């Protein structure tokens, strides 16, 4: 059996964080599983299931694991991030190792990257 991938995101506010990610990724609305967990799925079945776990405190700093979202327009997607309550960390794109990206944060300050898709 091949394992399926599920990504768990720690957060203080389950509703805000799960709705941000579901809306940003065009996932189905997040479903409340219980008082501690909500989950969202990709309606196309291609992306991993996202699980949101309520925690009392978010550890600050760079996580060794983060999401890279492949997008076709960095500025348009950064605008989408901010319109949904997130923020753009980098004003100018970073160009390194043949890739171009910017860092963003979700409403709870979790860092992820918008990476320009190679056409």
Image (cartoon, rainbow, N blue to C red):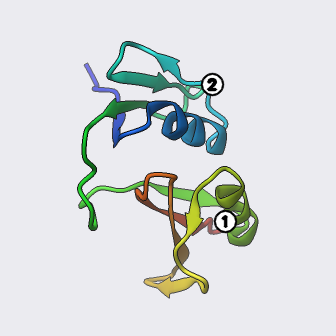
**In this view of the protein, which residue sits in the foreground, 83 or 22?**
83
User: Residue 101 occupies which quadrant of the picture?
Assistant: bottom right
Residue 24 % position (x, y): 64, 45
Q: Which mark is residue 78?
A: 1
**Mark 1 element type:** helix
Extreme-front residue of the structure? 56
Q: Which mark is residue 108?
A: none
User: Residue 43 occupies which quadrant of the picture?
Assistant: top right
Q: Left or right: where does residue 54 sit relative to residue 103?
A: left
Q: Residue at x 72, y 71 (%)?
A: 75
| Between discs 2 and 1, the one toward the N terminus | 2
Q: Is residue 62 above or below residue 51?
A: below
Q: Is residue 46 visible?
A: yes
Q: Are marks 2 and 1 in contact (CB under 8 Å)?
A: no
**Mark 2 element type:** loop
Residue 27 % position (x, y): 61, 31
Q: Residue at x 57, y 28 (%)?
A: 42
Q: Residue at x 62, y 53 (%)?
A: 85
Which of the image's four quarters has the C terminus? bottom right
Residue 49 % position (x, y): 44, 28
Q: Left or right: where does residue 85 sit relative to residue 98?
A: right
Q: Residue at x 62, y 42 (%)?
A: 25
Q: Identify residue for label 2.
A: 28
- Residues under labels 2 and 1: Cα distance? 21 Å
Q: Left or right: where does residue 75 sit relative to residue 55?
A: right
Q: Is residue 106 above or below residue 89?
A: above
Q: Is residue 5 visible?
A: no
Q: Is residue 93 above or below residue 109?
A: below
Which of the image's four quarters has the N terminus? top left
User: Residue 80 occupies which quadrant of the picture?
Assistant: bottom right
Pointer 1 local density, CA inside 10 Å: few below 14, some 14–19, many at least 20: many
Residue 84 % position (x, y): 67, 50
């Amino acid at each position: 059996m091949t394992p399926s991938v599920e990504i768990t995101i720690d957060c203080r506010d389950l509703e805000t964080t799960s709705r941000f990610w579901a809306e940003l990724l065009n996932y189905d609305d997040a479903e409340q599983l219980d008082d501690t967990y909500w989950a969202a799925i990709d309606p196309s079945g291609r992306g991993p299931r996202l699980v949101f776990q309520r925690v009392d405190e978010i550890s600050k700093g760079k996580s060794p694991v983060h999401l890279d979202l492949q997008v076709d327009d960095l500025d348009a997607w950064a605008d989408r991030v901010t319109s949904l309550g997130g923020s753009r960390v980098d004003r100018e794109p970073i160009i390194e190792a043949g890739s171009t990206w910017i860092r963003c944060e979700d409403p709870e300050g979790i860092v992820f990257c918008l990476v320009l898709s190679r056409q």
